[in-house]
Image (cartoon, helix red, strand yellow):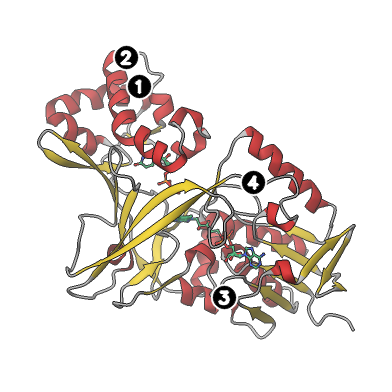
Amino acid sequence: MDHPFDCLVIGAGMAGAICARELAERGRKKVLVLERRNHVGGNAYDCFDQTGVLIHQYGPHIFHTNDKRVFDFLSRFTHWRSYEHQVVANIPSQEGRLELPVPFNLISMEVVFGKEKAASLAKRLIAAYGREKKVTILELRQNPDPDIADLARYVYEHVFVHYTMKQWGQRPEEIDPNTTARVPVFLSEDSRYFQDVYQGMPQEGYTPMFEKLLDHPDITLELGTDAEKRLTLEEARVLLDGRPFHGTVIYTGAADELFSCKYGRLPYRTLDFRFETHPADFWQSHGTVNYTVDQDYTRITEFKYLTGQELPGVTTIMKEYSRAYTGAEGEVPYYAIINEENNALYGRYKAEADRFPQLHLLGRLAEYKYYNMDAIAARALALCDDLLK
Ligand code: FAD
Ligand code: UDP
């Protein structure tokens, strides 16, 4: 008996949900989606906790993009609440704890050095790089001007080195430079974390957006189903439930797991999240506060800032603790550790996958990349353009 589906999508996160929708709607395909977790949305999943606060179970997710196609596409499945994320670094000082905008900007400079010194530093920086320019900390550390070098040392020490050690177990100069470049020194008074044209949060939350994305008569969704138990890759054949499957397969899980980690595990960082509920309207000053000098956790997020939920007298915060991923039951691989050696290992799994012309690896896990949601959405739309040509 032939399978009743034209396409198989593994994972119901951003990559899988968009592909399923596009293939079903634009391609008129019958699509089976298998999701290991008991919910949709991948790491962008949100839900209400016991006290009724809307939380992000797998870390704070703020939507931002310059890609109109992505924004317009997702806007079919959600209204947006306008939200521009702001982050501060909370650091100890002689006068008690200071809070400075991150990315470190002209306002952060005033908080640290006072108006006069900050103005003179700003002048030199703007002469060197230009107003409203973004300069990575690694670039700034190369500047020979002694005053700029002092500033670079301050920022490195108070914003980057300890946070990066906590997050990656390595120093900023040892990790992929694109990672710290995500949070450059910004020669501006703009204290938003992102400068994208479109920024916001799904009005009702991410999960309802994903549910709408997947709500199509030609999409069959099976939750709590690990593809490992249903899918077999042998020689150049794909089997679904033991029978040959000839349709398109889009796999959005970890590439090593697809091949039983036969070349060894791809290294990742995982996170432990600790949630706390407090009897207050708000608990901290901003949506996210980064602990860039001390504490074992990297940052604390207070969800009510992000979601705009109005719920007096109660608020939930979340602390993030980073550590090496071991592959143990229940652990989630959150961040690929991008370097030459790991990319080469990934390349071996990708080459295995390429032996199956019907199989496509797509997503933050499957491509072993540090992608934001909008980048994944753009890649999912582009892959479907190709498949539906
Ligand atoms: P995922 O969301 O990981 O989805 C993959 C899905 O596949 C999962 O649901 C998984 O259970 C399922 N799966 C895996 N293997 C199998 C299998 N064998 N069988 C069945 N199902 C399987 N991006 C932003 O744009 N803004 C942010 O503020 C932001 N914050 C983030 C914070 C944290 C802590 C993290 C970790 C990421 C953040 N991101 C953010 C990135 C965002 O999470 C990703 O870009 C996005 O979720 C990637 O979607 P995806 O579909 O590729 O992967
Ligand atoms: N970073 C840092 N201090 C900060 C913020 C970021 O050192 O206050 C570095 C750190 O290495 C981090 C990277 O910049 O992993 C990227 O930060 P981002 O906030 O983009 O990380 P994400 O939200 O993806 O965890």
Quadrant assignment for ligand 1? bottom right
Whether residue 132 is visible to the viewer of this picture, yes or no, is: no
Measuring 53% from the left and 73% from the top, which residue is drawn there?
210
Residue 309 image position (x, y, % from top left): 28, 72
Foreground: disc 1 or disc 2 = 2
Cβ–Cβ under 8 Å for marks 4 and 2: no
> What is the count of numbered marks?
4
Query: From mark 3 to mark 2, how far is it between C-alphas?
Result: 53 Å
Query: From mark 3 to mark 1, how far is it between C-alphas?
Result: 47 Å
Mark 3: amino acid: Leu
Foreground: disc 4 or disc 2 = 4
Query: From mark 4 to mark 2, how far is it between C-alphas?
Result: 41 Å
Name the residue beneath numbered marker 3. 213
Give the quarter of the image for residue 163: top left
Name the residue beneath numbered marker 2. 145
Measuring 29% from the left and 44% from the top, which residue is drawn there?
295
Checking the image for residue 266, the label placed there is 4
Does residue 180 appear left or right of residue 252 in this picture? left
Residue 113 image position (x, y, % from top left): 17, 29
Q: Residues within 10 Å of mark 4 (few under 14, many from 20)?
A: many
Cβ–Cβ under 8 Å for marks 1 and 2: yes
Checking the image for residue 128, the label placed there is 1
Mark 4 residue element: loop
Mark 1: amino acid: Ala
Note whether 54 is above or below 259 in the view shown: below
Q: Earlier in the sequence, mark 3 or mark 2?
A: 2
Give the quarter of the image for residue 287: bottom left
Checking the image for residue 84, the label placed there is none
- Nearest to the observer: residue 203 or residue 310: 310
